[in-house]
Image (cartoon, grey):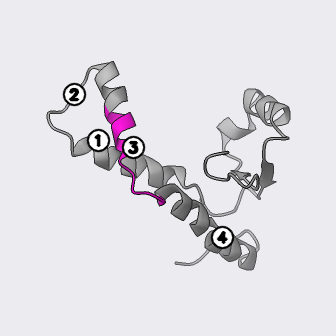
Amino acid sequence: MSIAHSDGLGQFHQDNETPHASRVATKWFQEHSSDFRHFHWSPKSPYMNIIEDIRYALLHGFEKRSPPTCIPMDLLTALQDSWCEFPQGYLQKLFKSMLHSFASLLRARGDPKRY
């Protein structure tokens, strides 16, 4: 959070998925509530998680590597290398895209947005 939002204005957007509502996650959010703002939205809201974009980019970078590897430490190194190869500003661009998504969500009053 401090890397992406060095201004201290970071927010965690809770999408009400089961892992985010678990006792362990709820306790962690309570313990770290001063580190960032925790934004809740209704369970019927559209899927708005940039993690999928990041996962796809990491996977794409990993698949470009040659030769492929199945050794756990090599996999970890390959993923770390893929992370470091993200273009400068990539993560900030994803975070900024959330502004448009939230505006769409607010206009739709939490219902799925039309594409």
Per the model, the C-alpha gap separating discs 2 and 1 is 10 Å
Which residue is pictured at 66% across the width and 70% down the height?
Answer: 99
Could you say which quadrant of the image residue 80 lies in?
A: top left
Would you say the residues marked 3 and 4 are in contact, meaning their CB atoms lie under 8 Å apart? no
* Rendering coords of residue 2 (x, y %): 67, 45
Which stretch appears magenta?
Answer: 78-89
* Rendering coords of residue 43 (x, y %): 73, 55
Q: Amino acid at mark 3?
A: Cys
Closer to viewer: mark 3 or mark 1: 3
Would residue 24 appear left or right of 87 to someone viewing this image? right
Comes first in the chain, label 3 or label 1: 1
Which residue is pictured at 73% across the width and 68% down the height?
Answer: 110
The answer to whether residue 92 is visible is yes
Neighbours of disc 4 within 10 Å: few (<14), some (14-19), many (20+) = few
Q: Secondary structure at mark 4?
A: helix
Comes first in the chain, label 2 or label 4: 2
Which residue is identified by label 2?
69
Would you say the residues marked 1 and 4 are in contact, meaning their CB atoms lie under 8 Å apart? no
- Of the pair 73 and 40, the residue shown nearer to us: 73
Quadrant where the N terminus lies? top right
Neighbours of disc 3 within 10 Å: few (<14), some (14-19), many (20+) = few
Closer to viewer: mark 2 or mark 3: 3
Q: Secondary structure at mark 2?
A: loop
The mark found on residue 84 in the picture is 3
- Of the pair 1 and 111, the residue shown nearer to us: 1
- Residue positioned most to the left: 67
